[in-house]
């Protein structure tokens, strides 16, 4: 496995991120399906903060950050195989100041980040 930089052009990388994000949308703050046009606009501004995890030319997942908040997801068939942990550990070497906001009911992400040395520091209360 290796992390590669996301391309600055729409295409395979951006499409892979969109597909994986939508496949795992229940784990994100906004669990709505993201459509191609909105995704392209978002990626145009944020592609440089994203990396893809690849193995044998297959994209297994992605990791990135927006305003130092980590976004990570793995294709369903590659979950629970150490892919996300690899991505988080490598990503933190490149972007050491990042943190993770995790939905209360997302126990898999909570365990992932705890296993990578993250600690709870705040509670965010919303109305």
Image (cartoon, grey):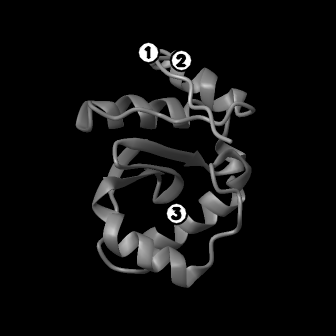
* Residue annotated with mark 3: 17
Task: Say which residue label 2 marks.
Answer: 114
Nearer to me, 65 or 126: 126
> For the residues marked 1 and 3, what is the alpha-carbon distance in whole angstroms?
25 Å
- Where's residue 105, x and y in %? 75, 32
- Residue 86 percent across, percent down from the top left: 45, 32
Q: Nearer the viewer, mark 2 or mark 3?
A: 2
Using the image, determine if residue 125 lies above or below residue 44. Answer: above
Q: CA distance from mark 2 to mark 3?
A: 24 Å
Labels 2 & 1 near each other (Cβ < 8 A): yes
Q: Residue at x 62, y 21 (%)?
A: 111
Position of residue 82 relative to residue 126, above or below, is above
In the image, residue 122 sits, relative to residue 105, either above or below, namely: above
Asked if residue 88 lies left or right of residue 45, the reply is right
**Which residue is found at the position 24% from the left and 37% from the top?**
94
With 22 as the anchor, is 16 left or right in this view?
left
**Mark seen at residue 117:** 1
Q: Quadrant of the N terminus?
A: top left
Query: Which of 92 and 86 lies nearest the eye of the viewer?
Result: 92
* Nearest-to-viewer mark from 1 and 3: 1
The x and y percentages for residue 123 are 56, 24
Badge 3: few (under 14), some or many (20 or more) residues near its Cα, within 10 Å? Answer: many
Q: Is residue 58 left or right of residue 109?
A: left
What residue is rendered at 34% in x and 37% in y?
91
Q: Who comes first in sequence, dot 1 or dot 3?
A: 3
Considering only order in the chain, which callout, 3 or 2, is on the residue closer to the N terminus? Answer: 3
Q: Position of residue 65 (x, y in %)?
A: 38, 48
CB atoms at circles 1 and 3 under 8 Å apart? Answer: no
Q: Residues within 10 Å of mark 2 (few under 14, many from 20)?
A: few
Estimate how packed mark 1 is, as few (under 14), some (14 to 19) or many (20 or more) residues with alpha carbons within 10 Å: few
- The residue furthest bottom is 37
Q: Quadrant of the C terminus?
A: top right
């Amino acid at each position: 496995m290796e992390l590669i930089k996301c391309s600055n052009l729409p295409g395979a990388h951006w499409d892979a991120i969109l597909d994986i994000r939508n496949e795992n949308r229940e784990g994100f703050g906004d669990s709505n399906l993201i459509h191609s046009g909105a995704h392209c606009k978002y990626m145009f501004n944020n592609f440089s903060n994203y990396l893809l995890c690849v193995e044998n030319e297959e994209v297994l997942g992605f990791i990135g950050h927006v305003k130092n908040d980590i976004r990570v997801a793995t294709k369903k068939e590659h979950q629970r195989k150490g892919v996300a942990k690899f991505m988080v550990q490598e990503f933190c070497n490149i972007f050491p100041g990042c943190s993770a906001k995790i939905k209360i009911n997302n126990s898999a992400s909570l365990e992932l980040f705890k296993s990578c040395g993250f600690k709870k520091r705040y509670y965010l209360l919303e109305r």
